Each structure stands twice: as structure tokens, then as C-alpha cells.
Image (spheres, rainbow, N blue to C red):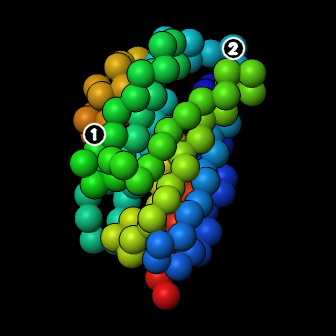
């Protein structure tokens, strides 16, 4: 059983920042990509930022490029999503996901194999 555990969701004003964390199993998913998907109210779920666990290559959706940064801590097997310049359109439930693909492949896959439980991000004044 693979568990992905997200944390860090919160309410923030427009223009603010948040950092999300995803704890992954240290001894598994070695050749997987790990990524962040979000589900906004009334919209389809989309992959916004993904990273290859093997070589660290990254992929971002156009909607977050230049504002969000995905990174990994190899020692703790934690994946981070630093979100800056947040906009109300960034509101949604953010899920950590994993699949045996490249970073771009994961972000464009509608049904990754493993999912976390999600963490709520709300951007409003």
C-alpha cells in the first residue's frame, strides 16, 4: 500500500504564498513521477506541477508557470509545492499523485495510480 500524505493547505489573501508538502514512502516509487493536481469548484481536476523522482526534471502547467515551484527533499522523501503570487483562481483541493511516468506524462494523466487525500487551499480577500 502506497500512502501519499499532503499538508500545508490554508486560507491566504491574493498575492500571498503557501507551501504544500507531500510525504512519500522512502523505499518505494523510485522511478515514479510525483506531482500536484488541483480540483477547483466546478472545474475538472488538472495537473499543475510534477517532478521526476529519479532525475528531478519538472513540468508545470501554463496556469502556474513562474509562480509555483515543485521540489523534492531526497533525505525525507518529501515533495514540496511553493506557491507564490496566489490568485483566487488557485483556490481548490490540492492532491499529491504518483505514477510511473515522466513529470510531463504524470501532469497530463487524468488518472494517476496513487493519490493522497487532498488539502484545501483558499485564496480570497
Instruction: Establish if 5 lies above or below 17.
Output: above
Task: Count the numbered circles shown.
Answer: 2
Give residue 76's position: percent from left, percent from top.
75, 27
Q: Nearer the viewer, residue 81 or 107?
A: 81
Residue name at image x 39 percent, y 75 percent:
88
Describe residue 63's horizontal placement relative to residue 28 as left or right: left
Describe residue 101's horizontal placement relative to residue 44 as left or right: right
Residue name at image x 24 percent, y 48 percent:
62
Q: Nearer the viewer, residue 14 or 37?
A: 14
Residue at the extreme bottom of the image, as rendered: 125
Residue at the extreme right of the image, as rendered: 76
Describe residue 24's horizontal placement relative to residue 92 as left or right: right
Give residue 87's position: percent from left, percent from top.
39, 71
Sequence-first disc among 2 and 1: 2
Q: Nearer the viewer, residue 74 or 118?
A: 74
Q: Secondary structure at mark 2?
A: loop
Quadrant where the image shows the N terminus:
top right
Give residue 32's position: percent from left, percent from top.
47, 18
Residue name at image x 26 percent, y 64 percent:
43
Check residue 27 in the rendering and tell me which mark sits there, or answer none: 2
Residue name at image x 49 percent, y 49 percent:
95
Task: Estimate the spatial distance between the alpha carbons at disc 2 and disc 1, rounded to whole Å.
Answer: 25 Å
Amino acid at each position: 500500500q502506497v500512502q501519499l500524505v499532503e499538508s500545508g493547505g490554508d486560507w491566504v489573501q491574493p498575492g500571498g504564498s503557501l507551501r504544500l508538502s507531500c510525504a512519500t514512502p522512502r523505499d518505494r516509487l523510485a522511478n515514479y513521477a510525483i506531482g500536484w493536481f488541483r480540483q477547483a469548484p466546478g472545474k475538472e481536476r488538472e495537473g499543475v506541477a510534477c517532478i521526476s523522482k529519479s532525475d528531478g526534471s519538472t513540468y508545470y502547467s501554463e496556469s502556474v508557470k513562474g509562480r509555483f515551484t515543485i521540489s523534492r527533499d531526497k533525505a525525507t522523501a518529501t515533495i514540496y509545492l511553493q506557491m507564490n503570487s496566489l490568485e483566487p483562481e488557485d483556490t481548490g483541493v490540492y492532491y499529491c499523485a504518483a505514477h510511473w511516468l515522466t513529470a510531463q506524462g504524470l501532469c497530463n494523466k487524468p488518472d494517476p495510480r496513487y493519490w493522497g487525500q487532498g488539502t484545501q487551499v483558499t485564496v480570497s480577500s
